Image: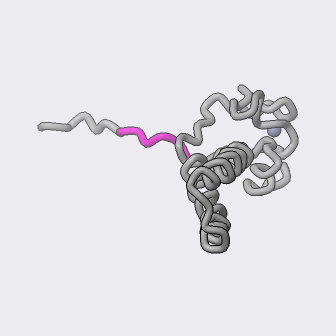
Amino acid sequence: MPREVSPISAGLGCRCPNCGEGPVFKSYLGFAPSCSACGADFSKADSGDGPAFFVMFLVGILVTPPVLLVQIMFDPPVWVHIVLWTPVIIGMSVWLLRPFKSILFALQWKNHAEEAQWESTGTHGK
Ligand SMILES: [Zn+2]
C-alpha cells in the first residue's frame, strides 16, 4: 500500500503529490509532464489564478504593518516607500508563488479536483 503523502508537505517541498519524491516543476513555475520517481501524470495540472490570489493576499498582510510603521515613525517622502517596498513585495511574491502553486496542485491531486463538465441528458428542450 502506498504511503499517504500530505499535500502541504509535498507542496512546500515542491514534490510529487502522489509519491512525495519527484520534483513537480521542470522550470521555476512550469509543471513537469510527469513525476520522475513514480510516473504520475501531471499533464492536467492547472492551479489557475489561485496561487497568485493567495500570494497577493499574504504579501499584502505581511507588508502593510511595516509600511505603516515606517510611515508613522519617519514620515518619509513617497519615493522612499517605492524604493523600499517594491523589491520586498516583488521578491516575496516570486518566492512564495512556487510553493503556493505546488500546494494548490497537491490539494487538487488529493481531492481529485477537475474542471466541471456538463452531463448531457439528451432531453434538453423536449
Ligand atoms: Zn511521484
- Residue 14 located left or right of residue 124: right
The residue under the point 57% across, 58% down is 57
Question: Is residue 62 or residue 126 the one in the foreground?
Answer: 62
Location of residue 73 with respect to 36 vertically, above or below: below
Residue 71 lies in quadrant: bottom right
Is residue 113 highlighted in magenta?
Answer: yes
Residue 76 lies, in percent from the top left, at 62, 62
Residue 48 lies, in percent from the top left, at 54, 40
Which quadrant of the frame does ligand 1 lie within?
Answer: top right
The residue under the point 62% across, 35% down is 45
Is residue 83 highlighted in magenta?
Answer: no
Question: Is residue 95 or residue 51 the one in the foreground?
Answer: 95
Question: Is residue 24 or residue 126 the one in the foreground?
Answer: 24
Classified by dominant secondary structure, the portion drawn in magenta counts as: loop
The residue under the point 43% across, 42% down is 116
Residue 95 lies, in percent from the top left, at 74, 46
Residue 98 lies, in percent from the top left, at 72, 43
What is the number of callouts on the image?
0
Extreme-left residue of the structure: 126
- The answer, for residue 106, to whether it is visible in the render is no
Residue 90 lies in quadrant: top right
- Residue 116 located left or right of residue 48: left
The span picked out in magenta is 110-118
The residue under the point 85% across, 37% down is 22
